[in-house]
């Protein structure tokens, strides 16, 4: 039962559009799947943008030819005949960023919450970036509703914490997340700077990992005085990122 909740994964590439970064490589390694791991991409949070899928396929086919890559699109209808069977057959399910509010609404319509829990309990590594990080938690902060950040509280709850990605790069996320935890709107939780991932086994944090130096993970909880207490976590730097 493993989740890798991140603010990273694929990395931008000026020539090809995207490349497989150390964090996604780590997710594949966590599956211990052997020589031909199966990785399924979901871009629900981008409305199943075909260009995003194309970049993912191209990056994996180029950088990780050992991977058997597939995708699950839900627009205009599921792209596979049996969604449950397809997801349960994977070693890694990787969820891209975008609108977490829309992702959760569409997944609810298709019953993916229950399927994802079943896959998680069956040993499929669940992972993703941004919306693909927050979705596994109780809730967090989002710009799904417009430029003013708002809380989201209807995450899948596989992890009984709150979560906020892009903690260091999007203005307003840090203070809002702290206010929401201090007020009890969100439970205590975790935040990640860009390039950082949190590896959970069950609901226990195993470690934080990063694809760049200087980035941090953060534990945010309600203090005895009713304010928020923030604790920095230095992640393990993963090998493999080029300058």
Image (cartoon, helix red, strand yellow):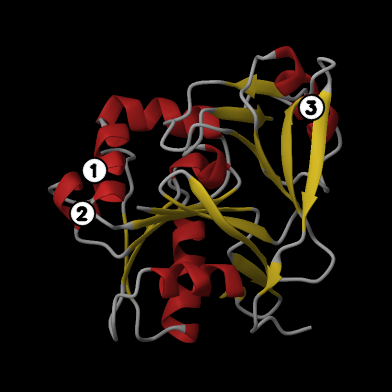
Which element type, helix, strand or loop, lies under badge 3?
helix
Point 63% across, 29% down: residue: 140
Which element type, helix, strand or loop, lies under badge 1?
helix
Rendered position, 14 above or below 73: below
Categorize mark 3 by other alpha carbons within 10 Å: few (<14), some (14-19), many (20+). many
Q: Is residue 21 visible?
A: no
Does residue 25 appear to the left or right of 175 in the view shown?
left
Q: Earlier in the sequence, mark 1 or mark 3?
A: 1
Rendered position, 56 above or below 160: below
Of 147 and 9, nearer the camera is 9
> Which residue is denoted by mark 3 in the rendering?
178
Point 29% across, 86% down: residue: 35
Q: Label for residue 88?
A: 2
Q: Label for residue 118?
A: 1
Q: Residues at badges 1 and 2 in contact (C-beta under 8 Å)?
A: yes
Q: Earlier in the sequence, mark 2 or mark 3?
A: 2
């Amino acid at each position: 039962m493993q989740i890798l909740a991140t603010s990273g994964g694929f990395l931008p590439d000026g020539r090809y559009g995207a490349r497989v970064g150390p964090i996604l490589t780590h997710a594949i390694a966590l599956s211990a799947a052997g020589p031909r791991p199966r990785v399924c991409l979901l871009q629900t949070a981008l409305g199943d943008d075909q260009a995003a899928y194309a970049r993912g396929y191209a990056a994996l086919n180029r950088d990780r030819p050992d991977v058997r890559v597939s995708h699950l699109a839900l627009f205009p209808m599921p792209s596979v005949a049996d969604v449950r069977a397809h997801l349960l057959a994977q070693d890694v399910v990787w969820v891209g960023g975008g609108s977490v509010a829309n992702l959760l609404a569409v997944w609810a319509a298709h019953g993916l919450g229950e399927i994802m829990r079943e896959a998680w309990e069956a040993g499929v590594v669940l992972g993703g970036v941004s919306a693909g990080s927050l979705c596994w938690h109780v809730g967090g902060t989002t710009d799904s509703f417009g430029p003013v950040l708002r809380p989201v509280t209807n995450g899948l709850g596989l992890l009984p914490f709150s979560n906020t990605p892009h903690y260091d790069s999007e203005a307003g996320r840090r203070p809002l997340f702290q206010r929401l935890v201090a007020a009890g709107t969100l439970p205590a939780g975790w935040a990640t700077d860009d390039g950082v991932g949190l590896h959970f086994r069950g609901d226990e944090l195993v470690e934080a990992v990063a694809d760049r130096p200087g980035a941090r993970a953060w534990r945010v909880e309600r203090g005895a005085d009713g304010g928020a207490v923030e604790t920095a976590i230095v992640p393990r730097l993963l090998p493999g990122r080029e300058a």
